[in-house]
Image: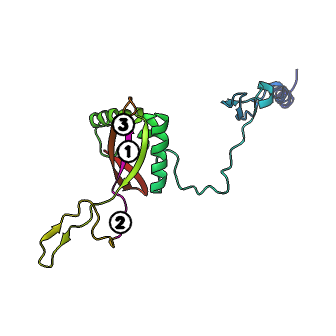
Amino acid sequence: MPTAPCFRLLMLALLALACSAWPHAADAQVRRCAGPTGELIYTDRECRSIGASDRLLRVPPSSYAGSAYRGGCSRHLSDLVYGLTAAIGAGDVNRLALYYDWAGMSTRQAYAVMGRLEGVAKRPLVDVLPVYPSPPPVLSEDGTVLDANSDGYYPQTVRRGAPVALRIEQTFGNQYTPSRTIFGLRRRMGCWWVRL
């Protein structure tokens, strides 16, 4: 019969042998692959083995200024106009809703606004135009109003400020009855948003 120290050594050797034979957990690596039609596939296998290719991240062109945050935050007013035009042109109410300022709105109000946005998204787009603040009236020397200046003609030397709203010109389904929606503009958190 083996002595205690030899028995311990024998047991340690058997334990080491058993541990070395035990299957190791594979170091799994999740790979991101592009399928044959461009769909994104996550797998732990080589992309080639499932008939896909390595999905490479697209590098933006050098002319890209990075001014518009994808997801609705338009850093410049021109980005907002472009986003609204694209959303309405596509008839996509969810995309149009990305540019809406939902802050401080209840669920009931949001449903009502979403219904109005859906109507805007369904109508054919004619144009998106800026709305400028009303020019000051023309006053006489004593302060009386000579001309309310509602047409903005006088005085012609006054520079226009930044737009205060966007006017969405559309037609109804019959293609000739005009429809107009005015979106107020709001600048919040460094982005331009619209409000009804």
Picture quadrant where residue 97 is located: top left
The spot of residue 176 in percent (x, y) is: 37, 34
Residue at numbered disc 2: 160
The quadrant of the rendering that contains the N terminus is top right
Q: Which of marks 3 and 2 is in front?
A: 2
Magenta span of residues: 159-170
Can residue 142 be seen here? The reply is yes
User: Residue 168 has which mark?
Assistant: 1
Q: Is mark 3 on a helix, strand or loop?
A: helix
The spot of residue 136 in percent (x, y) is: 24, 67
Q: What residue type is labelled 1?
A: Ile
Residue at numbered disc 3: 117
The spot of residue 68 in percent (x, y) is: 52, 52
The spot of residue 44 in percent (x, y) is: 73, 30
Q: What element carries label 2?
A: loop
- Closest to the observer: 125 or 69? 125
The answer to whether marks 3 and 2 mark residues whose Cβ atoms lie closer than 8 Å is no
| Vertical arrangement, residue 65 with respect to residue 140, above or below | above
| Vertical arrangement, residue 88 with respect to residue 24, above or below | below
Can residue 46 be seen here? The reply is no
Q: Distance between the residues labelled 2 and 1?
A: 20 Å
